[in-house]
Image: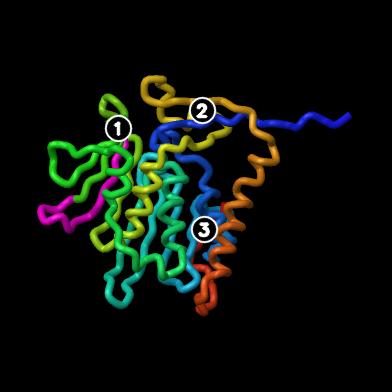
Amino acid sequence: MPRPTETVEVEFIAPRHLAGGGDPAWITVPLHRACGWSHGHDPLIPRVILSSPDQKALLRLEPDPEGQWWTFHHIATQGRPAWHASFGARTPVEIIAGFTDALTAPAATAAAPADPYEPLARAGWSPTSARDRLLSPDGRAMVQRAGSAGDGPWFATVTLPGPRWVWQARFDEHTPPHLITAFTAALADPSPVPRTGSPVSIPTRNPNLVTRTHRGVPTMQVASALEERVRALAARRTASPTHPSTPRQPPPNSGRSR
C-alpha cells in the first residue's frame, strides 16, 4: 500500500508587501550558486557579504531588524556613476528577488526602456496629493521619487496603521531604472507569497489588512522550490552569450554564507 504524501503547512499571504521578510536564502543562495557571486567564510560574524564575479557589485546582509538589512553597492562604470540600494529587514525576499534577478540578468535586458511607475499603475496603484507618489490599493505601500525635478532617489515605504513603519526600500538617484522597475513589478505582483514556520515574522495578522490562506503542500515541493529557482537562474546565465572573465575572489573581511 503506497504511503501517503507527507505535507507541510504553508501559509500564503497577500498582499505580499505585508508578508514579512521570508528566508534570506531565496536571495543569497542563487546569487552564489547560480550567478557566481563569491563569499567569505567567517562563522563568527553574523553577516553575509557577497561580491559579483566582475567585482563591481557588493551585497552586505547585516542582522539589523530595525534598519536597512540588505545593502547593495555598485562601483562606477562607463556612463554611470556609482550607485547603491538598500532594503529593510522585513522586505519580502520575493520582492527583493525582482531586483537581484534583474541585476544578474544578461546585459541586453538593461537596454529596454524602464519606468518604475508603470507596473504600479497597471496594478491599480493611484496617485496621491503629493507629486511623484503612487499608493497601493490597500493604502499601506507607497512609492515615490524625491527631488523637485523628479531626478532624486526613489523610496518604497510600507506602513501599518498608527502609523507604524514596516519596511523601506531605497534607491539612490543613479540606480539603473530597469532595476527599480523590476523591483516595483515584483512589489505590485498580486500573487500571494508562501511562509512557513512561526507567524511572529508576519508584520500583522489583522484580517482587514492581510489574507492568510493555509494549505498543506507536499514536503518535497517545499524543499525543492529553492533548488528549482537556482536551476532556472543558472540556465539563464549559461545561455548568455557572454560571461564575466574576472576571477572570483571573496572581498576582504567577508562574512559567512547562509
Report the residue at 23% width, 55% height from top: 153
Dot 2, how many residues are within 10 Å of its Cα: few (below 14), some (14-19), or many (20+)?
A: few
The image's mark for residue 255 is 3
- Which callout, 1 or 3, points at the residue further toward the start of the chain? 1
**Label 1 – label 3 distance at C-alpha:** 39 Å
Location of residue 63 in the rendering, given as x and y in whole percent from the top left corner: 45, 46
The image quadrant that residue 156 belongs to is top left
Q: Amino acid at mark 1?
A: Pro
Q: How is the image coloured?
A: rainbow
The residues colored magenta run 146-159
Q: Which comes sooner in the sequence, label 3 or label 2?
A: 2
Front residue (pair 236, 56): 236
At numbered mark 1, what does the secondary structure look like: helix, strand or loop?
loop
Q: Would you place residue 213 above or below residue 92 in this image?
A: above
* Residues marked 1 and 3 touching at CB (< 8 Å): no
Q: Which mark is residue 199?
A: 2
Tags 1 and 2 touching, CB below 8 Å = no
**Residue 235 in the image: above or below residue 28:** below
Q: Are marks 3 and 2 in contact (CB under 8 Å)?
A: no
Q: Mark 3 vs mark 2: give the one in front.
A: 2
Q: The residue tagged with tag 2: helix, strand or loop?
A: helix
Q: Residue furthest left?
A: 148
Disc 3 marks which amino acid? Answer: Gly
Using the image as rendered, state which of residue 250 and residue 116 is in the foreground: 116
In the picture, measured across the screen, residue 93 lies left or right of residue 170, that is right
Q: Residues within 10 Å of mark 1 (few under 14, many from 20)?
A: some
